[in-house]
Image: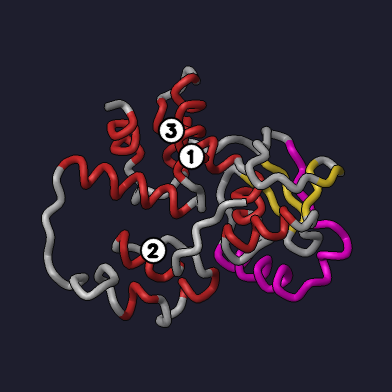
Amino acid sequence: MARNLDAKCRQCRREGEKLFLKGEKCFTDKCAIERRNYPPGQHGQKSTRLSGYGVQLREKQKVRRIYGLLERQFRKNYHEAARRKEVTGEALLQILESRLDSVAYRMGFGASRTEARQIVRHNGILVNGKRVNIPSFQCRPGDVIEVVRPAKEQLRIKAAAEAAESRGYPEWIDVDAKALKGTFKARPQRSELPPTINESLVVELYSK
C-alpha cells in the first residue's frame, strides 16, 4: 500500500498551521509550529508570494495531508463528491469525515489519523459487530463503531480515548469512552467542521 513517508512535522510547517498529525505532541509546546512556524528547507524563511493557482494548490495539499490521502485517492473522493446533489466542497468533507479511519480518530480510538488507520488495518475495529479493516470504508448514520476486545487492553488506545474525552467529541458522534464504543450519528454539517479549511479553493482547482 502506497503511503506518504514525509516527516509529519515538516508537513505542518509546509502548510503553516497545525494539521494534528502527531497526536498529543500537537497539543504541547513541542509542536514544530510553536517552535519554527516557517516552511522547511534552507529557503523556508524567505517570504514568497503565491499566485492564485499556488493558493489553491496549497489548500488542496493541506486538506489531503490532514486526512492522510495520496493524490489518486483524494481525486477519487472529489469526483464522488461532484456527483452528489449537495454542494461539492461540503460533500467532499463529509466523505472524508465518514471514512472509518477518520471516525475512529474522532472517537478517540487513535491519537492521530495515522494511528487510527493502523488500528483499522490490524483488524482492531468492529462496525455493527463485524470486523472491517478497510480505512476508506464509508460509515453511514447509525453505524456502531467499537474497538475489538483484545485491543481494548492496549495502553495507547486507552490513552488516546482519555485524551479525546477530555477535549470533547464532535456533535455528529456519540462515544462511550470507557467501553471504547461509539455511534456515528450523522454526516457532519459544514458549520461543525474546522473553519481553517477552505474547500472552495479545492473545488476551483479541480474544476479547471
Residues at marks 2 and 1 touching, judged by CB atoms closer than 8 Å: no
Q: Secondary structure at mark 2?
A: helix
Name the residue located 67 percent from the left edge and 41 percent from the top edge: 184
Instruction: Please tell me which residue is depicted at 41% across the width and 27% down the height of the picture.
Output: 88
Q: Earlier in the sequence, mark 2 or mark 1?
A: 2
The residues tagged by marks 2 and 1 sit, at their Cα atoms, a distance apart of: 19 Å
Q: How is the image coloured?
A: secondary structure
Q: Residues within 10 Å of mark 1 (few under 14, many from 20)?
A: few
Per the image, the residue denoted by label 1 is 72
Mark 1, secondary structure of its residue = helix
Residue at mark 2: 11
* In front: label 1 or label 3: 1
Q: Nearer the viewer, residue 205 or 156?
A: 205
- In the drawing, what numbered circle is on residue 60? none
Judge whether 125 appears above or below 205 on screen. Answer: below
As rendered, which of 189 and 66 lies closer to the eye? 66
| Magenta span includes 61 | no
* Amino acid on which the number 3 mark rests in the picture: Glu
Helix, strand or loop at disc 3?
helix
The image quadrant that residue 150 belongs to is bottom right
Kindly identify which residue carries mark 3: 90
Dot in front, 2 or 3: 2
Q: Position of residue 76 (x, y in %)?
A: 50, 32
- N-terminal of the two: label 1 or label 3? 1
Q: Are marks 1 and 3 in contact (CB under 8 Å)?
A: no
**What span is colored magenta in the figure?**
143-167
- Horizontally, residue 124 falls left or right of residue 207, namely right
Circle nearer the viewer, 2 or 1: 1
Please state which of residues 181 and 121 is positioned toward the viewer in this rendering. 121
At 41% across and 48% down in the image, what residue appears? Answer: 63
